[in-house]
Amino acid sequence: MRIATWNVNSIRSRIDRLEAWLGRADVDVLAIQETKCKPEQFPMARLEALGYQVAHHGLNQWNGVAILSRVGLTDVQVGFDGMPSWGEPPVAEARALGATCGGVRIWSLYIPNGRHLTDPHMDYKIEWLDALAVAARGWLTADPQAQIALVGDWNIAPHDEDVWSMEFYLDKSHVSPRERAGFEGVVDAGYADVVRPHAPGPGVYTYWDYQQLRFPKKQGMRIDFVLGSPALAARVDGAVIDREERKGTGASDHAPVVVQLAD
């Protein structure tokens, strides 16, 4: 089984490329982030026509998560227990969607950006990660043999090699000790980065800013991850970051990440 994650940065802008990529990539399950649309704007029929069952959670032109599966899609859950809210009044944003696909519990996750180190959004980001770690630990406590994949845009580069220049990012978000500790909290809950052994750094990224010619300059960040439970990690026999999909007109600023699971 092949599972993938991709921040498409607006599914309405990227639907043609998404359809073409699905035809080439032959993935069984795709978790999508930043759909940036309301339910009635989501291209459900076009994706179902490709043979996928689809679950989507979107509230407005921000955030939004989806799961596409051709190996079954059951037990859909919007958000997780304890997930923090944001805004005034506080709202549970469209940042987490879970479903069981082919025996694997998939969570499509779009972790808050944090904006900058002293912004209240950073506190929200840390609270969100801490709540995810608690929930994720609970899922494994309930069933230590559960096959769980926590996938998506984490908005964190957990290691220095995951950014093109630590000097450039030292006073910026995504690499701060608080954020990295939040990421490690999920790892410590029992989940492993299953892509890194197959796509080691340095110089291996999943995101390149549109500005300053970051992509052709190879100035990227690795912030999109697949974290697997022990039972899921034991099945991984390959992974790739599809950097080619970042090329060309109309590309997302993120590349898809694909993981191969043994039968």
Image (cartoon, rainbow, N blue to C red):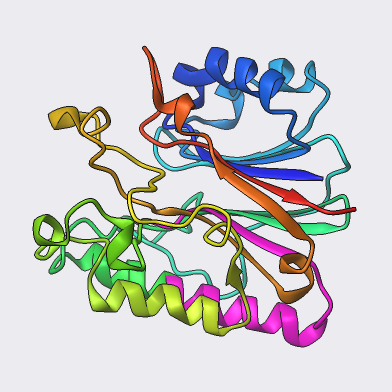
Q: Quadrant of the N terminus?
A: top right
Is residue 244 placed above or below 226 in the rendered structure? above
Magenta residue check for 141: yes
- Looking at the rendered structure, the number of numbered marks drawn on it comes to 0
Closer-to-camera residue (59/186): 186
Magenta residue check for 4: no
Is residue 161 placed above or below 14 in the rendered structure? below
Which stretch did the figure color magenta?
129-154
- The image quarter containing residue 232 is bottom right
At 61% from the left edge and 74% from the top edge, which residue is drawn? 191
- The image quarter containing residue 73 is top right
Closer-to-camera residue (176/94): 176
At 34% from the left edge and 55% from the top edge, which residue is drawn? 202
- Give the farthest residue toward the bottom: 141
At 52% from the left edge and 60% from the top edge, which residue is drawn? 196
Q: Position of residue 236 (x, y in %)?
A: 73, 59
Closer-to-camera residue (246/116): 246
Q: Position of residue 22 (x, y in %)?
A: 67, 24
Q: Position of residue 243 (x, y in %)?
A: 45, 33
- The image quarter containing residue 126 is bottom left
At 15% from the left edge and 58% from the top edge, which residue is drawn? 169
Is residue 122 placed above or below 41 in the rendered structure? below
Q: Position of residue 225 (x, y in %)?
A: 51, 56
